[in-house]
């Protein structure tokens, strides 16, 4: 779902002609350290999808959001908020039960499936088998919703995962496995921050559907999010994966 996230990072503007439908786009993994703004970007993606005039948005998270992340513009209009369905499976077992029962749900199929905090559901059983099973079930659920929605109105999938410290071989293997299921990725890296600000560099890899793009994301003390294109420099070969464990305030 790189196109939806790209529109969020481009402040709602289209990326250009020939954009892919949700049905054609690969699922996306949103990666960053603690406090790196993953939930805010997920919620912004939910608002963006809710304004597209398609089906509702299903937002899965282990606990209710304490506050709605702030954005500029009309994105927080009530009609968009009403199209976002929050569900709070408290455990891995309840999340699996919810996903397995998706075929029984009534009403219009979601146009976007979001999961915040995948690591919280993997911590109960951190083995690679559990990670693979949960990733496959998320993909199957999105495919099921796509079939229900009909041709050209598929269901996209974005999952947020907190990255861990460098040198943890178990987490590195788990991440490498998840990347097989999520070919599109967006990495959030820390950048120099001002007083009271949290500044990040967002690097979007659309999974073979275009070049990597980057933005600067700043969270003000009041929680408002501002986004600017990242200035490209000749010879800048820095890898977004090299800083994946950077801690956040």
Image (cartoon, rainbow, N blue to C red):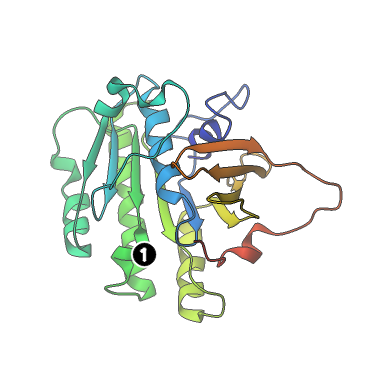
For residue 108, which quarter of the picture? top left
- Residue 125 visible in the displayed image: yes
**Which residue is rendered at x = 48% and y = 65% of the image?**
163
Label 1, secondary structure: give it. Answer: helix
Front residue of 71/10: it is 71
Residue 30, relative to residue 41: is it above or below?
below
- Residue 152 visible in the displayed image: no
The answer to whether 2 appears left or right of 159 in the picture is right
The answer to whether 6 appears left or right of 140 in the picture is right
Residue 73, relative to residue 239: is it above or below?
above
The percent coordinates of residue 197 (x first, y second) are 55, 49
The answer to whether 76 appears left or right of 24 in the picture is left
Residue 166, relative to residue 217: is it above or below?
below
Report how many numbered discs are placed on residues in the image: 1
The percent coordinates of residue 145 (x first, y second) are 28, 37
Front residue of 192/84: it is 192
Residue for badge 1: 119
Please identify the residue farthest to the right as the structure is shown: 234
The percent coordinates of residue 35 (x first, y second) are 45, 57
The percent coordinates of residue 50 (x first, y second) are 35, 27
Is disc 1 surrounded by few (<14), some (14 to 19) or many (20+) residues within 10 Å? some
**Which residue is rendered at x = 35% and y = 57% of the image?**
117
**Which residue is rendered at x = 56% and y = 54% of the image?**
187
For residue 91, which quarter of the picture? bottom left
């Amino acid at each position: 779902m790189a196109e939806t996230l790209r529109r969020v990072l481009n402040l709602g503007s289209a990326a250009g002609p020939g954009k892919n439908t949700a049905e054609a786009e690969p699922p996306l993994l949103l990666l960053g350290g603690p406090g790196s703004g993953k939930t805010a970007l997920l919620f912004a993606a939910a608002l963006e999808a809710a304004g597209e005039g398609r089906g509702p948005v299903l937002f899965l998270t282990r606990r209710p959001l304490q506050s709605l992340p702030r954005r500029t513009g009309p994105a927080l209009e009530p009609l968009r908020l009403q199209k976002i369905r929050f569900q709070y499976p408290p455990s891995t077992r309840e999340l699996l039960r919810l996903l397995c029962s998706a075929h029984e749900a009534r009403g219009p199929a979601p146009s976007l499936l979001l999961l915040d905090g995948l690591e919280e559901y993997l911590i109960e059983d951190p083995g690679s088998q559990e990670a693979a099973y949960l990733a496959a079930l998320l993909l199957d659920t999105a495919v099921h919703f796509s079939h229900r929605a009909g041709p050209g109105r598929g269901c996209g999938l974005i999952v947020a995962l907190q990255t861990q410290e460098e040198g943890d071989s178990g987490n590195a293997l788990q991440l490498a496995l998840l990347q097989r299921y999520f070919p599109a990725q967006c990495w959030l890296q820390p950048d120099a921050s001002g007083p009271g600000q949290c500044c990040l560099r967002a690097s979007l890899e659309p999974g073979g559907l275009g070049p990597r793009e980057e933005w600067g994301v700043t969270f003000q003390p009041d929680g408002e999010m501002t986004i600017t294109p990242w200035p490209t420099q000749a010879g800048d070969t820095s890898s977004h994966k090299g800083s994946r464990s950077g801690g956040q305030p």
